[in-house]
Amino acid sequence: MVARSEAKQKSAKIDLSRRTGSAHPILEQKNIRDELRKAEAKRPGDAPFGSRIEEYMTARTSNGNGLRERSAIETRRYLEKDFKPLHNMALAQIRRIDVANVLSEIKSPAAHNRARSTLSKFFAWAVGKGWCDVNPVVGTIKAEGESKRERVLTNDEIAAIWLNGQNGYGTILKLLLLTGCRRDEIGGLKWSEVDLNARLITIPGSRTKNKQEHIIPLSEEASKLLAGVAPREGYEHVFGRTMAAGFGGWSSAKSELDEIVKIDDWRLHDLRRTAATQMAELGVLPHIIEACLNHISGHKSGVAGVYNRATYLPEKKKAFDQWAHHIKTIVAQATGANVTALKKKQH
C-alpha cells in the first residue's frame, strides 16, 4: 500500500539523519516523525473498529436490498454493545482470540451465534473494502445448544390474543394470524401495497426477508380489518404514529397484552408458525403453505425455484379463506357461539 511505502521512506530518512548528522538533527527527526504519524494515520486498517460501525450500518441500510428495520436494530446492538471491548482496537489488528474472548462472555447460545454471525458479516465487508486482510471471526466456535423454536399456539391462546388485542396493535395481530406474514411486513404495511378492491396485499421484495415480492390474497375477514382502518392524510403507512415509519412500540404493546392474556412464553413470530401448522392440519398442501408464507425452501428452493415460478394465487386464496374461517370458528367457540368448523380438504 502507498501509506506503508511512505512510512518506510520516512523511517529510512530518520536512520539516514542519524548516520550522516544533519544540520538540525533533532528538529529534522521531529518533522520526519510527524510526517510518519500522518502517513500511518492514512492506513484504513489503523482506524479503530468502533469508528467503522456507523459507515457499515449506512452501507447495509441505504439501498433497497439492505437490512430490514428490525435486523438493522439488532445488528447495531450487537456491534455497539456486545462488541464494545473491540471498539478501540485497530481494525486490522483484531485477532481471532480477541473475538473469541468477547463471544465467551455471551452465555445464550442463540445470542452468541447471532452476534458471531453479525461480526463476521461486518469483517467480510471490511475485507472487501480493503481495510483488513482477514476475517478474525473465521475459526471461532459456534455455540452448541441453540434450540429451534417450535412454539405453536393453542386454540384457546389464539382466541385470547384475538379477543384482547387493542387498537392498531390488535388489528396487526389479527392480520399476522390471518396472513402468516412476518411482523415488519404488516407493521410496516403501506397503503400503496393494499388493494381492497382486488383483495390483495403486494409486498415488494425490498421489504421481504428473501427479497422476493409477496402477493397475499386477502380473506373476507382480513379485508374487513383493513377496510376498518381509516387512512390519515400525509401518512403512507397503514399503522404507526409517525409519518416516516410504520408501527413501533412492539415491546410495550405486547407487555400490555401479556398482562391481560397471561400466555406463557410466546412471541409474535409464533403466530406465523401457528398459521403454517394449522393450515397443514386443515389439509393445505405443503407447497401451497410455502407460497402463502413466501418461503423459498423445499419445493421452490435451488434449481427448482428457478423453473417453478407459479404464484399459486387461486390456491393461496382458498388456503387463506379456509384458515380465516377456522380462526372465526375458534373465536366464536371461545365466546360460546355455535359455529360449524370446516372439514379438512386437500388443495
Image (tube, rainbow, N blue to C red):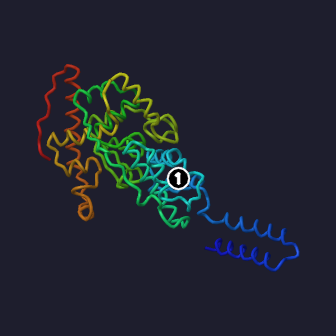
Helix, strand or loop at label 1? It is: helix
Give the residue furthest to the right: 23
Q: Which residue is drawn at 15% across and 39% down?
A: 282
* Image coordinates for residue 275, horizontal then vertical, percent: 25, 39
* Vertical comparison of 103 with 228: above or below: below
* Image coordinates for residue 257, horizontal then vertical, percent: 37, 26
* Vertical comparison of 96 with 253: above or below: below
Residue at the disc numbered 1: 57
Tell me which corner region of the image, top left, top right, bottom left or bottom right, holds residue 89. Answer: bottom right
Q: Residue at x 46, y 33 (%)?
A: 249
Q: What residue type is labelled 1?
A: Met
Q: State the count of labels.
A: 1
Image quarter of the N terminus: bottom right
Report the front residue among 253 and 267.
267
Tell me which corner region of the image, top left, top right, bottom left or bottom right, holds residue 13. Answer: bottom right
* Image coordinates for residue 203, horizontal then vertical, percent: 37, 49
* Vertical comparison of 331 with 131: above or below: above
Give the residue furthest to the top: 336
Give the residue furthest to the bottom: 20
Report the front residue among 334 and 270.
270
Q: Residue at x 50, y 54 (%)?
A: 98
In the image, 208: left or right of 3? Answer: left
Give the residue furthest to the front: 19
* Vertical comparison of 58 with 257: above or below: below
* Image coordinates for residue 290, horizontal then vertical, percent: 24, 50
Report the front residue among 150 and 205.
150
Q: Which residue is drawn at 21% across and 38% down?
A: 323
